[in-house]
Image: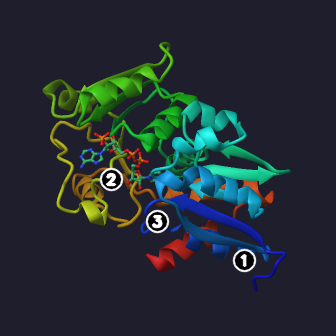
């Protein structure tokens, strides 16, 4: 039952049609008998500053932040934790003693999800398709866990090059236009291929990622950050070609469980969260 004592958490994004976070978190609060509620909060980009001020005024405990606010929100928060400074984006906010603090749990969420699938990161080479916010979280997480080299392939070379410049010069990260033959050839040395573009989400279902499967290292694990649908065209093709195929559900659960811990101080009940999502999907 929601009362005046119930602690309020939400998710800020625009639009919010794709988000499964309310399902996952409300199931988690219920299972641990925590007096919290998780509410979708669709906020148009031009209203973001007022929305953040409103969260404090209405004594929210925290929020998740999704597309397109993850970077923009940083200028409206009181503090940015190291996890978010590193990634350059916030996906979780905690409001404590009147102060808003931004965190990023996506990087750790991705890493945990692939480690739990038995994928080795240390000394490996990863190829990331796309150069947006999620790609940056993935790259940061991989570097923190000892990846040897990251190759970024994007439709826009300039954006991929800007992306690479955000990283320190002592890490091995290279940018390519993904149509470039040189990029396709590099797939031979790829141990982990990650799609961080929205191609494969149902709203983008007229487009497909063109992977030269004959070039890709046959041992490479293929990950899609997309979780809805749970089996994207990329993952179906990867399986057909004998690769381990991992969708974005594990990352969603891990980043969510870490955010849950920041808000409540309790361990996120990953199995409950997973069951709620699986049932829904
Ligand atoms: P973003 O910041 O908007 O970046 C998207 C990237 O994909 C950009 O590099 C963009 O290129 C590229 N892209 C977009 N449409 C494209 C197209 N039609 N063809 C080629 N490239 C295209 O978004 P994001 O936050 O990184 O999210 C990316 C994906 O990851 C989404 O599907 C999101 O749902 C998923 N995600 C999943 C989780 C999880 O927990 N599983 C967490 C975060 C994100 P341009 O710059 O050229 O537009």
- Point out the image quarter for the N terminus: bottom right
Q: Residues within 10 Å of mark 2 (few under 14, many from 20)?
A: some
- Residue 109 is situated, as x and y percent measured from the top left of the image, at 57, 49
For marks 2 and 1, give the one nearer the viewer: 2
Indicate which disc residue 198 carries: 2
Q: CA distance from mark 1 to mark 3?
A: 25 Å
Q: CA distance from mark 2 to mark 1?
A: 32 Å
Q: Say which element carries label 3.
A: loop
Is there CB contact under 8 Å for labels 2 and 1?
A: no
Q: Say which element carries label 1.
A: helix
Say which quarter of the image contains residue 237: bottom left
Query: In the rendered image, which residue does mark 1 sit on?
Result: 31
Does the Cβ of the disc 2 residue fall within 8 Å of ligand 1? yes
Q: Residues within 10 Å of mark 1 (few under 14, many from 20)?
A: few
Q: Identify the residue at horizontal 18%, vertical 24% (top origin).
A: 182
For marks 2 and 3, give the one nearer the viewer: 3
Colouring of the image: rainbow
Q: CA distance from mark 2 to mark 3?
A: 15 Å
Q: Identify the residue at horizontal 28%, vertical 26% (top origin).
A: 158
Which residue is nearer to you in this view: 110 or 213? Answer: 110
Indicate which disc residue 16 carries: 3
Q: Identify the residue at horizontal 60%, vertical 49% (top origin).
A: 49
């Amino acid at each position: 039952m929601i009362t005046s004592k119930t602690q309020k958490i939400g998710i800020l994004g625009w639009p919010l049609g794709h988000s499964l976070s309310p399902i996952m978190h409300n199931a988690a609060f219920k299972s641990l008998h925590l007096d919290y509620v998780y509410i979708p909060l669709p906020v148009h980009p031009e209203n973001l500053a007022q929305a953040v001020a409103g969260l404090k005024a209405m004594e929210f405990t925290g929020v998740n932040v999704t597309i397109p606010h993850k970077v923009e929100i940083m200028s409206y928060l009181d503090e940015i934790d190291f996890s978010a400074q590193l990634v350059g984006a916030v996906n979780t906010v905690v409001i404590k003693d009147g102060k808003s603090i931004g965190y990023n749990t996506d990087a750790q969420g991705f890493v945990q999800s692939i480690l739990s699938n038995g994928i080795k990161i240390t000394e490996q080479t990863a190829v990331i398709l796309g150069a947006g916010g999620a790609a940056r979280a993935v790259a940061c997480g991989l570097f923190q866990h000892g990846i040897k080299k990251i190759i970024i392939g994007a439709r826009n070379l300039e954006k991929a090059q800007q992306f690479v410049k955000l990283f320190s010069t002592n890490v091995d990260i290279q940018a390519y236009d993904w149509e470039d033959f040189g990029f396709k050839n590099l797939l031979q040395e790829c141990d982990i291929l990650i799609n961080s573009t929205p191609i494969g989400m149902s709203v983008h279902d007229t487009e497909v990622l063109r992977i030269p499967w004959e070039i890709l290292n046959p041992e490479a694990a293929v990950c899609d950050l997309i979780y809805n649908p749970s089996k994207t065209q990329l993952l179906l093709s990867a399986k057909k070609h004998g690769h381990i195929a991992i969708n974005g559900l594990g990352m969603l659960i891990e980043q969510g469980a870490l955010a849950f811990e920041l808000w409540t101080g309790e361990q996120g009940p990953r199995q409950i969260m997973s069951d709620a999502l699986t049932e829904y999907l």
